Image: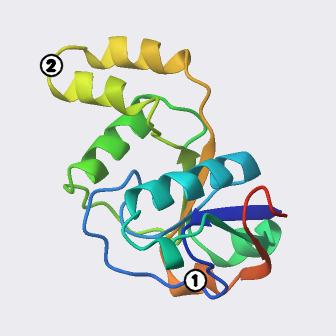
Amino acid sequence: MLLYHGSNVEVRNPRLINQTRGLDFGAGFYLTSSQSQAERFSEIVCNRKNHDKQRNMPTVSKYEFDISVAEKQLLFLRFQSADADWLRFVIDNRLRRHNKAEYDVIVGAVANDDVMPTIQALLTGFLSEEAALVALKTKKLVDQYCFKSDKALALLKCIQVYTPGGQ
């Protein structure tokens, strides 16, 4: 399968780094099977880091990932939809209070900029969990793969790095 990573730099050899903010599935190396999502995210990252124009270029790194080999060697956690379990897991990670067993790879929907207002409304008490789940059903959610171990990263093979629009 093909996976994509959007950034402001090329990432031929991914590695795990400490995160300073709460992310959907916690610290890890994030990818998606959606090329367009990775391209959009590379633009978002560049806009966030606009202080260094020389080194700040939307960049997508494309990888091959043999899922059949990975499923035999790695521990996966999969969320089939943006259901209550996914929502609670994302909230716990965003608030940095997740402490469940570790996995090599976590797969599920992205809590992107379109989804975050719903999650914020839930956290502030404006929406109930049930209402948040109903609201999430109206969103077009893209997948994300969070690689959380060096063992998982070792199964990624970078096959291309490009600038969106300049493929």
Of 41 and 131, nearer the camera is 41
User: Residue, x 57% and y 76% (percent of image)?
Assistant: 9
Q: Percent x, y for residue 46?
A: 49, 61
Badge 2 vs badge 1, beta-carbon distance below 8 Å: no
* 10 Å crowding of disc 1: few (<14), some (14-19), many (20+): some
Helix, strand or loop status at disc 2: loop
Say what amino acid the circle numbered 1 marks: Pro
Mark 1, residue position: 14
Kindly give the residue lying farthest to the left in the view shown: 124
Q: Which mark is residue 117?
A: none
Task: Classify residue 120 as left or right of residue 167.
Answer: left
User: Residue, x 56% and y 69% (percent of image)?
Assistant: 75
Mark 2, residue position: 125
Q: Percent x, y for residue 20?
A: 25, 68
* 10 Å crowding of disc 2: few (<14), some (14-19), many (20+): few
Q: What distance separates the C-alpha of mark 2 from that of mark 1?
A: 38 Å
Helix, strand or loop status at disc 1: loop
> Is residue 77 visible from the viewing direction of this image?
no
Image quadrant in which you'd find residue 49: bottom left
Say what amino acid the circle numbered 2 marks: Gly
Image: 61 above or below 106: below
Of 120 and 44, nearer the camera is 44
> Is residue 80 visible from the viewing direction of this image?
yes
